[in-house]
Image (cartoon, grey):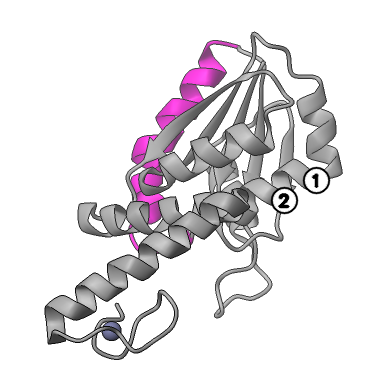
Amino acid sequence: MTVIVILGFHLKGDYPEKLEKQLIPFLKNKKQKKEDWLLVITGGHTDPYYPRQSEAMVILNFLMEKMIYPEAIYLETQSITTFQNLLFLAKNKDIQGLFQNIKPADSIIFAGEAGSKKEVLFLASHLLKRYKARIEYYPLYLYSDEKRKSKEKKYYLTVASYYFPPLYFWFSCSRWLEKRKLCWKIRRKICATPFSWGCDRCKI
Ligand SMILES: [Zn+2]
């Protein structure tokens, strides 16, 4: 059995078009092979213009329009970040039940924005490690290269800091030091702020 987890994102601009090119062929391929597969879609109410609409529902409607009908679909509609996508998934009772039937030969495939790959694989292997299935990532190239790279950098730090308090401490120290160095380069003075977010001159 394969569980495909689609991580939420705003489905607007040219995203539907990109999804159609990248995700639909992948899902249709699963369908053709007659593999047992289930779909989990996760994504909360993140669009301020449509607060009643969750990302998961929008993506589900999109897939239904494209005639994608897996054996079962589970929705998680509370999360607003990728981190929460995974956290709430691991805590959701229905989804826990689903994962409990997973065998070592099965696989869990996360499909999401390519920039979140490291974050997801890192978090998923920690949050879902009691399920012994293989965890894979199917990247969707929704953002421009530039945005993806900055996102990757940002999330990698955030991820580690959430999960390992000792690491969090070391990351804070290294970020603090980084800021001092940056500030020193800019104005040849030691940065005035006590924490890692920097002063007006060096904060990003
Ligand atoms: Zn500074």
Q: Is residue 22 above or below residue 17?
A: above
Residue to which mark 2 is pinned:
88
Residue 28, magenta (yes or no) = yes
Image coordinates of residue 176 in percent, x first then y, are 38, 70
In the rendered structure, are the residues bearing label 1 and label 2 in contact, judged by CB atoms less than 8 Å apart?
yes
Image coordinates of residue 132 in percent, x first then y, are 68, 18
| Residue 35 in sight from this viewpoint | yes
Disc 1 is placed on an element classified as: loop
Q: Quadrant of the C terminus?
A: bottom left
Q: Is residue 45 above or below residue 20?
A: below
Magenta highlight range? 10-34
| Residue 61 in sight from this viewpoint | no
Main SS class of the magenta portion in the image: helix
Residue 174, magenta (yes or no) = no
Please state which amino acid type lies under the numbered disc 1: Asn
Please give the name of the residue rendered at 34% of the width and 47% of the height, measured from the top-left corner.
18
Please state which amino acid type lies under the numbered disc 2: Phe
Quarter of the rendering containing residue 2: top right
Q: For label 1, count other residues whose C-alpha is less than 10 Å away and answer few (under 14), some (14-19) or many (20+).
A: some
Residue to which mark 1 is pinned:
92
Quarter of the rendering containing residue 43: bottom right
Image coordinates of residue 5 in percent, x first then y, are 60, 37
Disc 2 is placed on an element classified as: helix
